[in-house]
Amino acid sequence: MSRYTSYRTGGNADILCTPKSVSELVEILKILKTESVPVYVFGNCSNVLVRDKGIRGAVILTTGLKGINVNTTQITCEAGVSLSRLANTAMNSGLTGAEPISGIPGSVGGAISMNAGSYGTEMKDIVISAAYLDEDLNIRKKNSIELCFGNRRSCFTGTDDIVLSAIFSFKPGIKEEIRMRMSEYASKRKENQPLEYPSCGSVFKRPEGYFSGKLIQDAGLKGYTVNGACVSEKHAGFIINKGNATSDDILKVIDFVKLTVYNKFKVILETEVKIFGEE
């Protein structure tokens, strides 16, 4: 899985499937269900940490589901479409509203599942509806209210439902102005985030009334390192892989950060990154 995760760590999965259509996805799931094989569905693996012993069962990557369609001010995307492609499609269509999410490295399916966001814009602000497979492999649809978006969560959190596609709503804008705003956001990210190293982005959710990065910084943890896993000096909310870290190294840093922040500030940090695999 180190070939697929943004952390560049993780052991082997028993089976890897990369369907190119919803019908292929359904057929694969039917076979795996019949054989009682555990299933893990990932998108771009940008917010996933796979333990070093890997995953027993089948991993399905939805990155092959990459259809995208523009209809006036609405854009329909399949689950595997990257957020950067969505934002660029909106820009090229003269639609504004996707600029803040243009630098998020995830895909549409994962972003909706966790209500991903950046610079004040979250999925809940731009999604009209989403289609998904329920646990019985029926295709269903929910509108934005029914999606129950919250702090890095949605109605799909903790379920076996699989996001297939979503419809986004934007506003007409001027292409060059949109391009400039996207460039400004990209510059901010480059300046404030350790983009030169593998990471999952922000490791922890924002605690009520706090900023996780500020808490970690105030705890004096910038630069804290276990082998190749390190709390970024540039942004304390990021734990980076300096080149030779294992998933276990990253998990040790996560645990130490959580413990230290709690001991100093009595604030419980909850991980935003999703952790899978054998311990």
Image: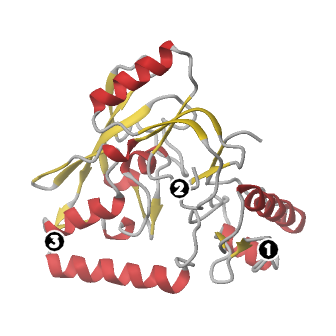
Which residue, as the protein is rendered here, is positioned at the far right? 263
Going by the image, does 135 lie left or right of 75?
right
Q: Earlier in the sequence, mark 2 or mark 3?
A: 2
Q: Quadrant of the C terminus?
A: top right
Q: Earlier in the sequence, mark 2 or mark 1?
A: 2
Give whichever of 146, 55 is nearer the camera.
55
Give the Cα distance between marks 3 and 1. 45 Å
x then y, percent, for residue 214: 69, 75
Local crowd at mark 3 within 10 Å, few (<14), some, or many (≥20)? some
Give whichever of 61, 180 is nearer the camera.
61
Amino acid type of the residue tagged 3 in the rendering: Gly
Q: Is residue 265 above or below residue 274?
A: below
x then y, percent, for residue 29: 43, 23
Give whichever of 267, 204 is nearer the camera.
204
Amino acid type of the residue tagged 2 in the rendering: Arg
Which residue, as the protein is rendered here, is positioned at the far top? 34
Inspect this view and state whether residue 179 appears.
Answer: yes
Which residue is under mark 2? 3
Front disc: 3 or 1: 1
Q: Earlier in the sequence, mark 3 or mark 1?
A: 3
Q: State the mark number for residue 148.
A: none
Q: State the mark number for residue 173.
A: 3
Q: Is residue 39 above or below residue 200?
A: above
Q: Quadrant of residue 102?
A: bottom left
Which residue, as the protein is rendered here, is positioned at the far left? 72
x then y, percent, for residue 100: 37, 69
Which residue is under mark 1? 225
Does dot 3 land on a helix, a strand or a loop? loop
Q: Residue at x 55, y 51 (%)?
A: 151
Give the Cα distance between marks 2 and 3. 38 Å
Front disc: 2 or 1: 2
Going by the image, does 228 lie left or right of 102?
right
